[in-house]
Image (cartoon, rainbow, N blue to C red):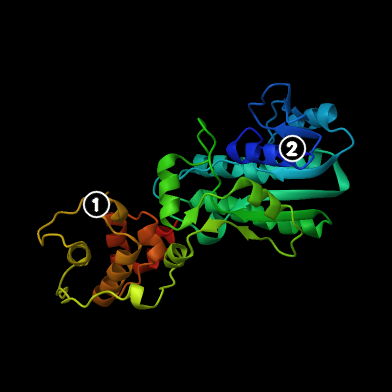
Amino acid sequence: MVITGGSGAVGTHFVHQLAARGARRIVLLGRSGADPQREVSGVEVLAPPCDITDPAAVTAAAAEFGGRGASLVIHAAGTAAIVGHRELTGRTFTDTVAAKVAGLATVTRHWPLREDARIVLCSSVSGLWGGSGHTAYAAANRLLDTMAVQLRSDGRRCTSVRWGLWPGLPGQTGIIDADEVARVERSGLRAMAPERAVDACLRDFTADPLVFTADPERLQLFLGNTPSGPAHEAAAAPEPSLDGLDAAGVLRVALGAVLNLPADTALEPSASLLDLGVDSLLALDLRKKLKKAAGANVPLATILGGATVAEVIELLEQPEKKARLRD
């Protein structure tokens, strides 16, 4: 068995779960490597340093550790650069997609695989849903999904699993930091139980699955579907007048109404609406007020994804930028 990105949080979860399921030999591929040889519950774990984007490095590692070919490949390599579209550089984008996309192509081309080998790609729901600051990361995962289709067309048993939130490891930073984990959890996703996640991904699927744990009600709000019922009916209140205001004024008055702020409250442009106190239910009310006053349909995903005051004002002024503000 081969696990790319095996020293990271996701790879480490796979090592322990596969060991518990009877794996006898696991090769971990990653730039940093690890101890040349170590035991995990009686399993031989080999971890040579190997840049999986480098064909020569993969070929050399395969010659020494490839044996008779891998029966299972878990492609868990990758990084996540969480930056807004204005700060995203070409270098950052390239670095984000390199291990996931180029790394997969290199490993499947240069590492020996048994004819019936299974290939499991660790993609993300971000590739389907996006999220604030997820431009490069979402693109990398969507490309990974596309590569799964290509590998299947080549006759390979390949599944791209669009994961939700993996738990971190004690004393180790995961693919995203604690602040980003908190923001992801505000969307409704919850950390998965590793044993259940691994069980799910090793099943035979006819299509690439989404595997995640979530608070369904909060996730429904994040995806833009408004729940109905008494629990979600806001109490009637006088609507503030938004006539004749510019975009900044509309947002200031609308926020003041939903948050009970004084009329002269100054809004810091870089402040996140979440940090100002807008939660999932208040976001519904704010969205309705902005739609009525400015005619702009601000996605709940934008509000709950951490959009700033400046970004929402820009969206009210230029609704065509909606897709960009969800990155």
Q: Which mark is residue 269?
A: 1
Visible residue check, residue 128: yes
SS for dot 1? loop
What residue do we see at 34% from left, 55% from top?
A: 307
Q: Which mark is residue 256?
A: none
User: Which circle's residue, 2 or 1, is located before the other in the chain?
Assistant: 2
Q: Position of residue 228 (x, y in %)?
A: 39, 77
Seen in the picture, residue 130 relative to 17 is either above or below; the reply is below
- Answer few, some or many: residues within 10 Å of disc 1's Cα (few below 14, many 20 plus, some between 14 and 19): some
Front-lying residue, 248 or 49: 49
Q: CA distance from mark 2 to mark 1?
A: 50 Å
What kind of residue is marked 1? Pro
SS for dot 2? helix
Residue topped by disc 2: 19
Visible residue check, residue 83: no
- Which quadrant: the N terminus? top right
Name the quadrant containing residue 25: top right
What residue do we see at 66% from left, 35% from top?
A: 6
Q: Position of residue 295 (x, y in %)?
A: 29, 76
- Which quadrant: the C terminus? bottom left
What kind of residue is marked 2? Ala
What residue do we see at 71% from left, 44% from top?
A: 74
What residue do we see at 50% from left, 34% from top?
A: 173
Residue 158 is left or right of residue 214, and the answer is right
Residue 243 is left or right of residue 320, and the answer is left
Residue 250 is left or right of residue 60, and the answer is left
